[in-house]
Every structure is written in C-alpha cells, then in structure tokens.
Amino acid sequence: MLLVCLAQHACFDCMGDDSSTFLTNGILALNRNDYDIGMHDLSNSVSIDPNNGEAYLWMGWAFLQKGQYDEAISNVSKTIDISPYKNDLAFAYLYRGDCYVFKKDFAHALDDYDRTLQLNPSITQAHIGIALAYNSTGRFNLALIHGDIAILQKPDSPQAYLVRALAYNGLLEMNEAYNDCEKVVQLDPKYFDAYNLMCRIATERRDFDGVISNCDKMVQINSTNADVFADRGWAYSQKGDFTRGIQDFSRAIQLNPHLTEAYAHRADAYNEMGRFNLAINDANIAILQDPTNSDAYSSRGLLQSKIGDFTNGIKDCERSVSLDTNCSDCFNNLAWLLAVAPSDQLRDGKKAVEYAERANELSSWTNGYCLGTLAAAYADVGDFEQAIKYAKKSIKLGLRGNDKKISLEMLKLFEQKKPYREYTVSK
C-alpha cells in the first residue's frame, strides 16, 4: 500500500564524468521502470566513485520498489554515512523508514521519519509514513494528526486521505473513514486499498449492497484476489442470493485452495439451499485446514443436526464457542440446537436462553435470527410471553426465504403455549 515518492533532488555528488554519466543514466532507467539496467548503471557509478552518496540513495530506492528491504536499508545507510547534502540525507532517512514499516519495525521507522522532517519538514511522505506506523500500532489519534498534516501539505495525495481514513476507522469513526476513502478514489479511481477499506466498513454496517459494489470495483482492478471473491460471496449470501454466493466462493477457492473462510461460508450457502452433504464436506475441509476455525465448527454443528445427528451437532457448536467467545453466530447456533433438539436428553433450555442472550448482545439485538433463537429458548423453558415477544421482533426485522415461514409457524406454536421442535430433514 505504501507508495514511495521519487526523490526530487538534483545534486550529483560524484567525481569524474564517467561516474556522473552512469548516475544520470541509472536514474533515467529507473524512471522508465527499467530496474535491471538502472541498478547496473548505478553500481558502475559507485564502483568509480565509492563516495557517491546519491548513487547509493537511488539504489536503495530501487531495492525498496522491488521489495528487497534489507538491501535497500544497506544502500541508503551508506548515503547517510557519506553524503554531506541535507536533501540526500532527508530522502535516505525517508526510504529507510519506509523499509522499516514494511518490515514492521515501527520504532525504527518513526525515528527515521522524525529525522527526515528535521532535515526537510516539507516531505509529505514522512507524515504519511508516520501515520502508517501509528495506525499499525493502534495509536490512531497520533495517526490522525499526521494524516491531517499530510493532507494540508498535499491535498491531492490519495495516500494521505487513506492513512487518515485508516485512523478514523481505528477510532470507530466510520462515516469520516468512508468519506476519506471516497476522496481517495476520486483522486485515484484504481486505488484498491481504499475500496477494500470501504468494503470492510460496509461489512460492519451490514450494508451488503455496499460490500458488493466495492468488491466489484476491486475485481476490476485485480481479478485474481481470492479474498475479494470470498467477501462478495458472503454479501450475496447475506442477501439470500446463494447461487451467486456459491459461484464467488468457488472462484475464491479456485484462486486460493487454502482459503478456509471460503469453504466455511460456502458450507453455509449450501446449507441454505438444502444441499447438506456438500455443505458438510466443505465444513470438514475448513476444519481440516484450520482446526481453530470457530465458524467451521459452528456450521458443521448446525449441518449435522439437519441430517439428524444432534449429538455431534451440539458438540461441534460447543467447540465453536470455546474457540471464539465473541462469535454471535456460534452462540446462536448452539442455543438453537439446545432449544429445539427433538430429544429431551439433549435439550437444555436454561443454557439455550443464556447463549441466545449472548448472541443477541454480540449482534446488538438487531439480528432477526438471534432474536428467533431467543424466542425458541424461552418457549423451551415455558416462558411463552417472552417467546412471543422475541418471535415478533424476529419476524419484524426480516428473515430469508423459508426461515420466515418457520418463524411464523413458531409464533403460532408459542401462542398455543407449545415449544418448537426440529426434526430430521431429508438430505
């Protein structure tokens, strides 16, 4: 994500025409993105003049662009050691700071960016780098300050708006973060990371159309990113379009066969379509790939109940909540099975109420499925007044397809002071 600015300085620290010529030709080649020729010419320049600090600086910049951070640090450090020119030194510290950010050595990165600004306060990229380092270490208020400065210095910089958006996002100021991302893509319509952040914000808002729209933009920019297809598949599934969801999950798996979340979510989509064996197969693969994946255990638990195996279904759901104590779907699925299992020996209404309340707390009492589960749990313990209350709230919030029909049937049972029981369905 980090874009490194080209050094805008023209000081040729060299001895002899040959060294100067190699330096000039090397810089021209780098500006053409011809790194091999450029670095060859720069190497010749320092061979002729080992004290040519600018040649080392440009070689460091080239290594940075190629992702060879240790080599970049080595070269710009030579510039720092030998160059008498403030501008060369400012950019050397800048590039070394950028390398440290990529290496996640944020303390050293901040030190180098501070030195950059001491030498040249007008280098906006240093403020952007500082904001990145602070965002990465959770110091969002400080990141916000430097994002503001970067935008003041360079209001046409998409990266300056993005680092401020990341800071706002970290501070949970989602509207401001989204607005800054929109500014980013106005300045650069192909800025992938801005669409990605907007997608994450839309996910938090449960704005499924927003997720799909931003994923569409990302696919246009990079059609080989498996995570984007998985995210869009999830959004389609949440809207009830399981066919498109499965298509996107399958594409994600094709691009990255080790993307566990794609298998887990495709299992959920197959479940909704009644294709339980395919769903269980995907859940098994997800668990095999990642034995700590709570969603996969939760999905498989619910799926096993669909083919009549409530015992192992409950065990899987219990495993899921032990792996993730903040997963609303995990608590919801466990509560559901404990509330509606056909066997008296398997049901536990009191625990079902406890787990369903936890699921609703985690989903801010805005998820129709979690509210419906709480209604079924209250019915199991004989509190039909509460069961009717939450069943109506569940229906009002809206449910997908056959789930709405089941909820209406549940409400009729509760009004007759009868609990709901789930039995084996066909495979």
Image (cartoon, rainbow, N blue to C red):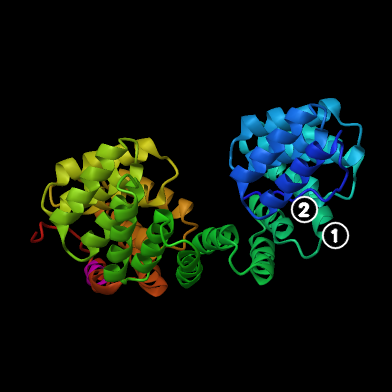
Circles 1 and 2: CB distance less than 8 Å? no
Q: Is residue 272 visible?
A: yes
Label 1 vs 2, first from the N-terminus: 2
Q: Residue at x 91, y 36 (%)?
A: 85
Q: Residue at x 24, y 64 (%)?
A: 272
* Residue 282, numbered label: none
Residues rendered magenta in the picture: 409-413
For the residue carrying disc 2, how many other residues have a C-alpha within 10 Å: few (<14), some (14-19), or many (20+)?
many
Q: Which residue is drawn at 54% across and 59% down?
A: 196
Considering the numbered disc 2 on the image, is that residue within a helix, a strand or a loop? helix
Residue ID for mark 1: 152
Q: Inspect the magenta stretch and tell me whether residue 410 lies in it.
A: yes
Q: Is residue 383 visible?
A: no
Residue ID for mark 2: 147
- Residue 86 screen position, x and y as percent: 91, 38
**Mark-to-mark CA distance, 1 and 2:** 9 Å
Q: Nearer the viewer, residue 209 or 219?
A: 219
Q: Which residue is drawn at 70% across and 61% down?
A: 158
Q: Is 307 placed left or right of 182 in the picture?
A: left
